[in-house]
Amino acid sequence: MTETDTWNPARYLTYADERGRPFDELLARVAATRPDRVVDLGCGPGNLTARLAARWPEADIEGVDSSGEMLQAARCVAGVRLTRADVRSWRSDRPVDVLVSNATFQWIPGHLDLLAGLV
């Protein structure tokens, strides 16, 4: 996917439950109790990012996505700051305590190399 590709948030949410269950299972294993900063790379329409905001209401929660359509849908999520950026070039301006991504990296060729840079 590139920044010129478009995503349909309503279509994406058709399988929200199926996509959300593994996210919840993995998130339950995150030991962070009071992170200052949580970032969701490839936040899509924000439905999973909302779960991060609910779990850590005191944290600065940022959702990052390259799709304007997805970010527009995510604007209804309270307590989340949204950033339009390509995750391949996005870099945080300060330390991140919890960095999550549900399904973004499967779309990115060479994503294993990218992950090392994000750590």
Image (cartoon, rainbow, N blue to C red):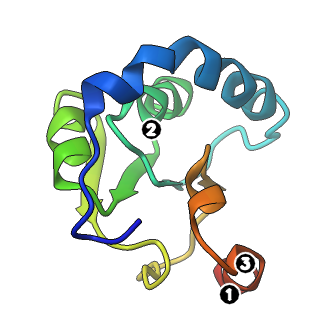
Give the residue displayed 74% in from the left and 44% down from the top. 32
Q: Residues within 10 Å of mark 1 (few under 14, many from 20)?
A: few
Q: Name the amino acid type tagged 2.
A: Glu
Amino acid type of the residue tagged 1 in the rendering: Gly
> Residue 12, percent across and down?
39, 29
For marks 2 and 3 on the same chain, the one whose residue lies earlier in the sequence = 2
Left or right: where does residue 25 sit relative to residue 67? Answer: right
* Residue tagged 3: 119
- For the residue labelled by badge 2, is the local secondary structure a helix, a strand or a loop? loop
Q: Is residue 106 above or below residue 25?
A: below
Say what amino acid the circle numbered 3 marks.
Answer: Val
Q: Is residue 111 left or right of residue 93?
A: right
Looking at the picture, tell me which residue is in the foreground, 90 or 38: 90
The answer to whether residue 98 is seen in the rendering is: no
Instruction: Say above or below: 79 vs 69.
Output: above
* Quadrant that contains the C terminus: bottom right
Query: Does the image show residue 119?
Result: yes
The residue indicated by pointer 1 is 117
Q: Mark 1–mark 3 contact, CB under 8 Å? A: yes
**Badge number at residue 58:** 2
Secondary element at tag 3: loop
Q: Quadrant of the N terminus?
A: bottom left
Query: Residue placed at 68% from the left, 30% from the top?
Result: 23
Q: Position of residue 115 (x, y in %)?
A: 71, 76
Q: From the viewer's perspective, is the residue at label 2 or at label 1 nearer?
A: 1
